[in-house]
Amino acid sequence: MQMYDLIYKKRNGRELTREEINYFIQGYTAGTIPDYQVSALLMAIYFKGMTGRETADLTMAMVNSGEVINLEQIPGIKVDKHSTGGVGDKTTLVLAPLVASAGVPVAKMSGRGLGHTGGTIDKLESIPGFNVNLQPEDFIRQVKDIGIALMAQTGIITPADKKLYALRDVTATVDSIPLIASSVTSKKIASGADAILLDVKCGSGAFMKTRQDAASLAQAMVAIGKLVNRRMVAVVTEMGQPLGRAVGNALEVKEALTTLVGEGPGDLRELCLTLGSHMLVLGGVSRDTAGARARLKDLLNQGKALQKFKQLIEAQGGNASVIDSPEKLPAARYQSSVAAPEGGYVADIDTMQVGRAAMLLGAGRASKDDLIDHAAGLVLTKKTGDFVKKGEELAVLHTNRKDALDAITKLTASAFTITVNSPEKAQLIWETIE
């Protein structure tokens, strides 16, 4: 078997066999197939696509390129959740303890932020002392003991995907649905979950800009699940404006805490209830999403989800007093108000631009080796549909970089489109694919 033959075959739109896909993944992971040949194959896939069977085989080849976490010791159906990323997406901080408090074991590996998107691990590390670097055996033991553990992804999981993504990033082949779908699902399957809930974002702050593209990606991932015997449910959700109001690590933890006591922004609460209801059904503790939603609301109102989050923080070495004293979280030295340049209704928010502003304030990374400031970020005072007077506050910036404030204030203000007429109410949940 020769790599040239695989490139030629896919270039001409023909289907690769499982053996051919395994050959290319194993060879590239081992370093026996060079970047230039894999780049050519990726470009052929980008233009010619892959069948459902090819995509599933690619997924499992990447799963098998590293270790697979075995969660069989943990009783019950293990349900994982993945978001395709966005701005202000602190869903896991609320959703994981909420679902765990309902009796579904949550053994979740999460990533760090890059560019305009935030990462769950960075948010957790804004809690003083919180340890995200667990050994697999400690990870499993903790889920058995308290029903939840959240840890950083390790190098032993899907090394082929890590190499392929780095190559896709420099060869303009990132936005290929088969390649995205196999990348996402390979990591989730290798993490050991029995069932997976996918939050597929669309809009200006998401990787998939249109609802149609997001639905296509969701369908591709759910199809992979069916072919590899993993139950997956995908929910297509809106990222046309930041989720909630806070963008930035410690700021998002504070907002998650208010949501865990039954308050918090309405869109964040609604998203967590929707995703959580599907997770309870997948986990076998509820028959339908309506009953699951009612149960989750009760757990929020009773403070059970907040108690579970406190238990999680304590188990992973964090300072759990932040639950009752959020002021113990990192705080920035400087705050600056962003004023509306004109009066009217907020018709649109360029969410990627807001994410970029947060990154420049210190909350994110331009490259993977950048250090982040856990205190930095911004809080939106106005969101889509709100009325604002000229000069009224749109957002508050938080940073330790005083010299950057003027430029970032202008950048943030320009992210808001203000019009005379009130826009239609923003939709949060678009569709569910099972």
Image (tube, rainbow, N blue to C red):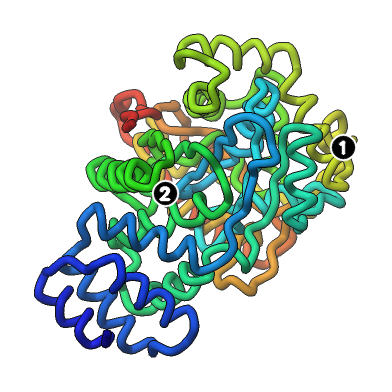
Q: Write the residue at 20% across / 56% down.
A: 51
Question: In the image, residue 107 lies at what x, y percent?
Answer: 65, 42
Mark 2 residue type: Gly
Mark 1 residue type: Ala
The numbered disc on residue 320 is: 1
Q: Secondary structure at mark 1?
A: helix
Q: Is residue 369 toward the left or the right of residue 324 in the image?
A: left
The total of numbered circles placed on residues is: 2
Circle 2 packing at 10 Å, graded few (<14), some (14-19), many (20+), is many
Q: Which residue is mark 2?
A: 205
Camera-side residue of 1 and 6:
1
Q: Residue furthest left?
A: 12
Camera-side residue of 403 and 277:
277
Camera-side residue of 107 and 376:
107
Q: Write the residue at 22% across / 69% down.
A: 16
Is there any visible trace of residue 89 in the rendered image?
yes
Q: Is residue 162 toward the left or the right of residue 346 in the image?
A: right
